[in-house]
Every structure is written in C-alpha cells, then in structure tokens.
Amino acid sequence: MNPLLQLEGVSLRYQTAEAETVAIERLDLSVAPGEFVAIVGPSGCGKSTVLSMIAGLLPPTAGSITLNGKAVDRPLPGIGYMLQRDYLFEWRSIWENVALGLDVRKQPGGRERAESLLKTYGLYEFKDSRPSELSGGMRQRAALLRTLAIDPDLLLLDEPFSALDYQTRLTLSDEVSAIIRKEQKTALFVTHDISEAVSIADRVVVFSARPARVTLDLPVTLPGSTPLSRRSAEEFRAYFDRIWKELQHHA
Amino acid sequence: MREPDRPRSSPLPGAPSADRSAYLRRLRRDRRLITAGRVLVLLLFALLWEGAAQLGWIDGFIFSSPSRIFTTALELAQSGELWLHVGVTLYETVLGFVIGTALGILAAVWLWWCPRAAKIADPYLVILNSLPKIALGPVIIVWMGTGTAAIVTIAVLVSVVVATTSIATGFFEADPQQLLLLRSLGATKFQQLTMVVLPASVPTMVSALKLSVGMSWVGVIVGEFLISRAGLGYLIVYGGQVFKLDIVMAGVVILCLLSALMYYAVVWFEKKAGRRR
C-alpha cells in the first residue's frame, strides 16, 4: 500500500543571530493510511518541530515531505493539526469554535458534518456555550472535533493531553482513540509519555536526542480495544521496557 | 493555562440558608455604605467651601463658592450661552476622539501587518509619546486657521499616539499559538487579523478608548484656550480675563460633569462588548 505520508531525508537547521542549530538530520518516516503512529523521544528532540513541518508551517531545509504523493509546501487541506492545548477562542461559542476551520476555508458544506460530530460526541448541548464554561477534558474534545470538522486525511496530535490532569488524560485518550478509529483517520501522535504511546498506537517510533533520527520503529499489537484496557495487557510491560531501554541508550 | 474540571456553581434547592441571607445582607449594606460615603465626601467638600466663603474665611470673589457657581451656571443656561459652549466643546471632543481612535486603530493594524515597519517606527513613537503634543498648538493654528479644524486637529494629535501604541501593544500580545492554529488551517493574514487579533484585543482597545477620551478633552480645551472663539475652554479663558472667577469655576464644573459622562459612555460600551464576548 502506498504511504499516506512520507518523509525522506528531512533536515532542519535553525538560524538565530547567535548560532546555527541542527534540529533534525536526514529523517525518514512513512505512515500508511489508517495507521495510528506515536512518536516518543526525549524532550527538546524536535518531535513537535517535525509535526510543524508536516503541517506545512515550517519548510524543511533539505529533504521532502509528501502527503498522498503531493509535496507539502504550505498548510494542506488534508492535514488537521491539534496542539498541546485547546486554544479555543473565548469570543466564539463552542459551535463556532468547532466550525473555525470551515470558516477559514470557506467550506459551508462542512456544517452538517460538524453538527453531527457535535451530536455524536456529546457536545451538542454545549454548542452555544463559551469555552470557559466547559471542563478541561470537554474543551480538548471540542478541539479534536474542530480538527475533525475539516475532514482531514491525516491528524497531527502534539501532546494533546499534556495539559490535563491524569484522570482526565486516561479518559480522554480512550475517547480520542475511539473517535479517531471510528472516523477511520490516520494519526501521528507526539508524546513524551511511553505508556500513553504504547497504549494508544499501532506503531511507536522512537526519536533520538537532537538532531532527531529514528532509532526504533516498533509495531505494537496488544489485545483490548481501548487504550485503558491495553494498559492492563500482559505484553504492555515488554513494549514499555523495550522503548524505555531505547531512550536510555540514546540519552 | 491548565483548566481543571471546575465545579459548576449550583444554587442549593429550597429557601436560602440563614448564613446565605446574612451574607447577602452584609453585601447590600456594604454597597449602601460605599455609595453614602461617596455622596458624603462631595457634600462635605461643597459645604466647607460654601461655609468658608459665607463666613469670610476666603474671598468669594476670588475663590468663588458652590452657590455662586450654581447661580452663574443657571444664568449662563438661561441666556443660552452655556448650551452654545457645551455644544461646541462636545462636538469637537467627540470628533477628535472618533478620528483619533480610528486613526489609532488603522495605524496599529498597519504596525501589526508589517513588523518591520513597527520596528522602524518604534523609536519615533516613543519620542512622540513623550512629546507634549500641545506644544505644536501654535503651529497647527498657523497651518489650519483659527477654527474648529485646528482644535479638532490638536485633539486628534494629542490622542492618536497613545491610542496607536496601546492598541498596537494589544495586537502584538495576541496568542501566537492561536495564530499558529489558524495558519495550520491555511488562514490568510487578513483572516488572522479579523479572527484572532481584533477580537482578542477588544479589552485593550476599550482601555485605549478610555485613555483617548481624556486626551481628546485635554486637546480640545487647550485648543479653545489658544483660539478663543467658543466652547468651554473659551468660556474659562474669558472668565479669567474679565476676572469673573465664578464663570471659570462654572466652566470647570461643567467640564467635569461632561467628561465623566463621556467616560461612563465608554464604560457602558465596554460592558456591552463584554456581554457579547
């Protein structure tokens, strides 16, 4: 099967007045349609930078990034980017926030889809609320629906649960995984939490410290249909240890 | 900002408890006391002034007194002179305020749009901000003539720099992550402006409005001092020249009332805008 997303020899050098930094060096990565891939790596290794490049916000200094064979040279409509925090706009209602991408892209056709997303995922009764009236978990769910409303082929999730408390985090990771699988989306998920990566993804990719390279590409098969149930699987520990050792080795 | 699951405030069913009623009573009493205190300060001040003038502690001719101010204001109102001056000053101030703010918003948008222009303009804005723009009054009169145009120009000049810098500061403080989110959706620069920067800066714009209201008053009154044709500034200068300090004081008191009125109009607008958000 042709990959949905392909990174070939991607490098990035940051320039500042003080110095030149090699953030990413010759990175190769491909994601097949329908896959749920998690990237883990030490903090500051450039995981989020890779997502920014795939989102078309930051051009790589070398190498190529393609989505469905098309070069990513600007933010493409096929990509939905979910940031660490919800960044809901307080001056918009929940409904208007979820429809943000449709407004930006002037796609009035997506309204019905957005409305059915709100209904399916339990936010319809809050559609006229302000973001500040919602709990942290609900806000992040609204942010996911905002990303899904534009019907992207590929979802980029940049530590989407890191700003939440532990319990909300576990619940929401179940919900998000269920939503993404139900909507049959491909997802690339960045986290520094090994358990989270193993529990939610089909494949875990481990990055080295800067400059980021792929040091391990590990397919994960665990029994259980939700991240929470997968956490209690027997093999969970083995996957965790394998990734933990890999990270230690390169630290 | 970490958002915990906040408990929703839920009123307990049934009649309010004794504690709650007591709390509400205290709250109401507190509010009444504050209002009474405010009125009292004004009354005491007026009473002291009036008393001092009546008892001959101060010379009422030079220091005036509340009763003299009141009579003078009444006479001016009856002759129709007062309404002319109030009308002229109000017209000039509102015009100066509206033009100054509009120019300020436009200039701020321009600075936000081209960050390089903002960097180039920065030292000049700092200097202009600390320059007493009123010093340019005589020049403006030479350029624009001795009419409303010159007065409004002075008012605009005084208010526009503060408006520009404070509104632009608000624009630059718009959350970069919210802008990043918009850009990831493919938003144009104009969409970033209208969908994030402008709505996020409503609070800063309102406080900039409050500043420029005051500035416009300063500009207009000084303009009227210099040009002396009509308006409260003219009335005050005229009163001083003919040594009728009752007229000066009446002018100042009316000015006080008007500027308070205009300030509260902005506050009202702020509340309305706040409800919408």
Image (tube, coloured by chain):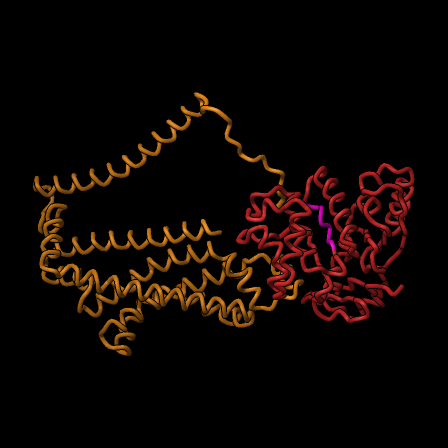
Chain colours: A red, B orange
Query: Is B202 on the left-hand or right-hand side of A148?
Result: left
- Seen in the picture, residue A153 relative to B20 is either above or below; the reply is below
Query: Is A17 on the left-hand or right-hand side of B21?
Result: right
Q: Residue at x 46, y 61 (%)?
A: B167
Q: Residue at x 13, y 49 (%)?
A: B70
- Seen in the picture, residue A40 relative to B38 is either above or below; the reply is below
Can residue A188 be seen from the camera position used here?
Answer: no
- Seen in the picture, residue A187 relative to B146 is either above or below; the reply is above
Query: Residue A12, position in %: x, y?
Result: 77, 66
Snapshot quadrant of residue B262: bottom left
Q: Farthest residue toward the bottom?
A: B143
Q: Residue at x 37, y 27 (%)?
A: B25
Query: Residue A68, position in %: x, y?
Result: 81, 67
Is A160 magenta? The answer is: yes
Q: In this orientation, which residue lies closer to the viewer: B99 or A110?
A: A110
Q: Farthest residue toward the top?
A: B18
The overriding secondary structure of the stretch rendered in magenta is loop
Region rendered in magenta:
A157-163
